[in-house]
Amino acid sequence: MKKRSMDSMIEETGLWVSRNGYLHVIKNCEASQKHIRITMGCGETIVVLNSRSSRAARSLRNRNFLKPCKSCRVPEEKIKEFSNKVSSKKDVKVTVKVVPSSEFNKANKKTPDTFLQSLDPQLMDPIKNPQFHDGPEIEKPNVPAPTFAPQPKIKKPGISKTTNKTFKQNVKPKKTEFTQNQKDRILSLLGPDEMISFSKDKRSFEELESTFKMQRKKDLVLMYETNRENLLGKLERTITNFFVDMGFLEIKSPILIPFEYMERMGIGEDKKLSEQIFRVGDDMCLRPMLAPGLYRFLYRFDNVLPEPTKIFEIGPCYRKESDGNSHLEEFTMLNFCQMGLNSTRQNLEYLIQDFLGFLDIEYELVSNSCMVYGDTIDVMHKNMELSSAVVGPVPIDMDWGIDKPWIGAGFGLERLLKVKHNLKNIKRAARSDSYYNGISINL
């Protein structure tokens, strides 16, 4: 049997059963898709979920209540009708006004939500108060009261005040325990340079959450008053100015590209790396790298621009990456390359040195290899890879019409931000609706 909606039951009865079991007369009622705002005859206003399976819905459906509210002055006729679980055939008792969610949320947020107040566990005990038990009634077993034979009085040994005092001093304070969800919540509220030891901190979860939420609010206000630049956008502008000053031409290539470009990069449908690509239809995909766009521009600029041809691009890329501290499915890449004269490994290392020195980031170069380009030079900061650099030519060049030496490197901007600002995870540096400049906004 399908459960009736809460707003339809309110329209039928015109009554409300509060969490403490009191029966109220409804004076006014507004409903959105997810919530219902109820004003009762006693003047109390609450906001509840518009749910078919909530405690409130069960109470209305089963007509369970403790006693009527004195301030509401519920008519005896209504109480009797509600108690007998039958409805008269008169017009509806209350008209529920349906409003859009946006208009519903504009109401006074300071209205006390007594519906969310704590519940007396004894009141909801299915044995002591079976009318609040949403299920079959529980019958108390008919067991005769036990009889006890009188017991001789036993004299308790005296305990001196000194002994009792010593015993109390040896009692260790109860250790504060945190669930994993509580730990994750506190860690998400920490600032870049903040640390916490859950085993040593004596504060409760509520105290810790309140403390860090207050600090993050202050951080956001200070940021708004002093510097309103988004770190990711600011880094992109800074890098753009650096490479333009170095004589590189900025390009912007399409984000939606033919999958045939990935086949030219050696990542066909038979390759495992193709599983990381977001496909759009049968023939298109979201670019997982900037290289196809750079290859096409190098081909078009060859024999047009003076050598060496130097170009760069900064833009979003998409891969089905595994979850981790340094991976994102949507991330921002910088790729720069130079083709023709002086395209040597030595000049590539000079470019990397000037670029990371400009950003004040320490690094080391490590030889490596990959499926697409073969031999590569990885740029590492501690255990994190910041970039993979290549000295061409490489075999896939012929599929793009390139026959000159070239050098290039690709950097992830979110990883650069994580290192530069000591962020705890890569998500704090990414495009996000949970963090702003590494600070939690889920407050």
Image: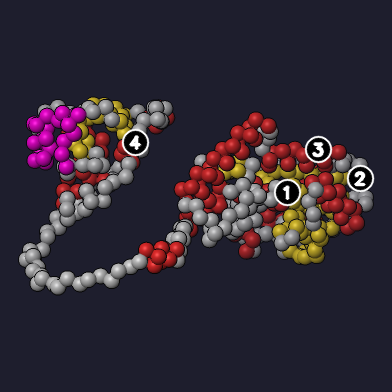
Find numbered disc 4 in the image and state the secondary structure of the residue it sits on.
Answer: loop
Q: CB atoms at circles 2 and 3 under 8 Å apart?
A: no
On the image, the x and y values in percent for residue 368 come to 77, 65
Task: Give the residue type that dot 3 points to.
Answer: Asn
* Res. 207 visible in picture: yes
* Res. 279 visible in picture: no
The residues tagged by marks 1 and 3 sit, at their Cα atoms, a distance apart of 18 Å
The residues tagged by marks 4 and 1 sit, at their Cα atoms, a distance apart of 44 Å
Mark nearest the camera among 4 and 1 is 4
Task: Count neighbours of disc 4 (C-alpha within 10 A) and say few if under 14, some if 14 to 19, many if 20 or more.
Answer: some
The residues tagged by marks 2 and 4 sit, at their Cα atoms, a distance apart of 71 Å
Q: Which residues are magenta?
A: 66-86
Q: Give the numbered dot on residue 241.
A: 3
Mark nearest the camera among 1 and 3 is 1
Is residue 64 rendered magenta in the image?
Answer: no
Task: Give the residue type that dot 1 points to.
Answer: Lys
On the image, the x and y values in percent for residue 400 come to 78, 52
> How many badges with numbers are in the image?
4
Q: Give the numbered dot on residue 113.
A: 4
Q: Give the numbered dot on residue 420.
A: 1
**Position of residue 396 in the picture relative to residue 88 (left or right):** right
Query: What residue is pinned by disc 2?
Result: 307
